[in-house]
Amino acid sequence: MTLSLYVPTPSPLHRLHPVTKLAGLVALVLAAFVVDAPAYLLPLGVIVAVLLVVAGALPVVRRFRTLFVLVFVFTLVVWTFFFKTVFVPTRAGFEFGLSTAIRLDTFLATGLLFLATTRVEEIAYALGRLGVPYKIGFVLTLAFRLVPLFFDAAGTIVQAQRCRGLRMDEGGVIVRLRRFVPVIVPVFVGALRRADRMAMALELRGFNSGRTRTTYLRARPAGRDVVAGLAALGVMVSYLALWVHGLGVLAR
């Protein structure tokens, strides 16, 4: 199973300009952040779910279905029983927990939608087009490149240790944690070696030369970007208007 979240599907969302997709991500996150009422958050979640279907990103959602359920259930239970009093469920706590659970799942789904339709190179390109220094853009996008590599290395090391007789699923909690040491140590050592080789490769390629950085990616905005940008802007402005007028906010 691939660790990358990008889904190479020729959908309308994939063909959008990287800056448009980044602006849409910010607009949806901001819209979900400014309101509390579940009745206002639920339509936003439905919009994100429809976009996931259009983008063909349902396989990515299925990979994270357990996380969606855990975030929703734990958030709802914790706020219901610990909103103002301890171990006493309240209606206000249930409403706030429900709204927070929908918001967090919407954040997660929006992030998955963005990563499923945008390559790492496009993220760096969008940040550069917005005036973000290339060093900051490189650091931000580096996480998307290295995290899958670390997980892949950890999986390889676990398989190698199991072939040598290491049992990861036997014993108590303390015993299992101790058995992870032969896995964690090689992962960290490999990460340090990879970081050292990457630093040398960047120096050889003139990363700190001070010259203007260039990129092979050339994206031009089209009519679909105008439509998508106006739609995202309309959603964000609508929710900001609700927030300004005191609508969609739960009473404390």
Image (cartoon, rainbow, N blue to C red):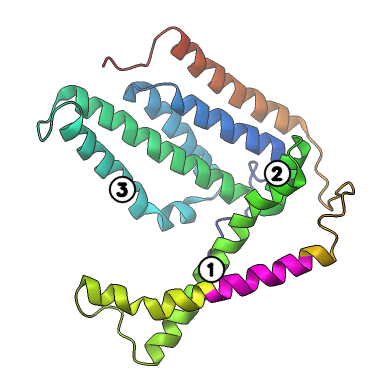
Q: Which mark is residue 15?
A: 2
**In whole angstroms, how far apart are the C-alphas of marks 1 and 3?**
26 Å
Classify 10 Å Cα crowding around label 3: few (below 14), some (14-19), many (20 and above).
few
* Residue 87, above or below 95: below
Query: Disc 2 residue type?
Result: Arg
Residue 196 appears at what percent x and percent y?
A: 68, 70
Chief SS of the magenta region? helix
Q: Is residue 88 left or right of residue 204?
A: left
Q: Classify mark 2: helix, strand or loop.
A: loop
Q: Which mark is residue 150?
A: 1
- In the image, which is nearer the foreground, mark 1 or mark 2? 1
Front-most of residues 130 and 135:
135
**In whole angstroms, how far apart are the C-alphas of marks 3 and 2?**
31 Å
Sequence order check, earlier mark of 1 and 2: 2
- Residue occupied by mark 3: 69
Question: Is residue 197 magenta-colored?
Answer: yes
Tell me whether the residue at label 1 lies in contact with that at label 3, contact meaning CB atoms closer than 8 angstroms.
no
**In whole angstroms, how far apart are the C-alphas of marks 1 and 2?**
30 Å
Residue at (83%, 46%) from the top-left corner? 218
